[in-house]
Amino acid sequence: MKLIFPILFIAISIITFIFGVNPIYSEVSGLKADIATYNAALDNSTNLQKTEDSLIKSYNEISQSDKDRLSSFLPDSVNNIQFILELERIANLHNMPIKDIKFEAKSNNNTSVDPNVVVSAISTDTRPYGVFPIEFTTEGDYGSFVLFLKDLEYNLRIADIKSISFIIPDASAKPVAGFDPNVYRYLVKVETYWLK
């Protein structure tokens, strides 16, 4: 009889621990892990807020003229008219009139379409910028054309010259009033870029 009460007390203690304390202890341990995760996320959030504040401060310290230059360098829209006006301005500096301007948006989808198959049009172009191709002709002597290209190279707006072809005047043709054998006709293909 002396042993029944201690054994019963030990059994009740074990059962209480298994069914009462252990689940609560496991739940508390899980909550502590969640608290640690949330504290880490809160610390990251605080660090991100500090980084954002420092970036905003740095951005606000940039002068408006520099912001305008950055906007000209890589605009946030196609702004094709402005680019054409820039090309004309540079060409006029060298007395090279721009003619026959052609441009079109570059197609992102080069696949053929079967009319019997229904396919959703999904753009495969994931670049963060768009491409604006333009083609034009101009006339002038070779030295002026080289200076035109140099000025285009140093222009603030990014422009890649994709191709240049030229036509030399026919020297055997009958001279006409105002005819200059040193004036060539150039066909230039250029691409410029803009942020999407």
Image: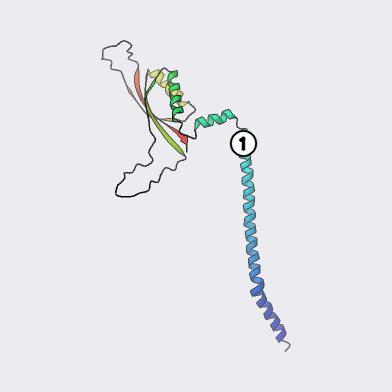
Residue furthest out toward the top:
177
Q: Is residue 42 above or below residue 109?
A: below
Which residue is at the far right? 2
**Residue located at (65% from left, 71% from top):** 22
Q: Residue at x 65, y 69 (%)?
A: 24
Q: Residues within 10 Å of mark 1 (few under 14, many from 20)?
A: few
Q: How is the image coloured?
A: rainbow
Q: Position of residue 12 (x, y in %)?
A: 68, 79
Q: Which residue is mark 1?
A: 58
| Secondary element at image label 1 | helix
Which residue is painted at 53% across and 31% down in the image?
A: 70
Residue 92, x across and y down, in percent: 43, 19
165 w.r.t. 180: above or below: below
Q: Judge whether 155 appears above or below 54 on screen.
A: above
Quadrant holding the N terminus: bottom right
Depicted 190 relative to depicted 49: above or below: above
Q: Is residue 129 left or right of residue 189?
A: right
Nearer to us in this view, 82 or 16 = 82
* Relative horizontal placement of residue 63, taking residue 123 as reference (left or right): right
Residue 79, given in percent of the width and then of the height, sits at 46, 31
Q: Amino acid at mark 1?
A: Ser
The quarter of the displayed image where residue 93 is located: top left
Q: How many marks?
A: 1
Residue 31 lies left or right of residue 115; in this view the side is: right
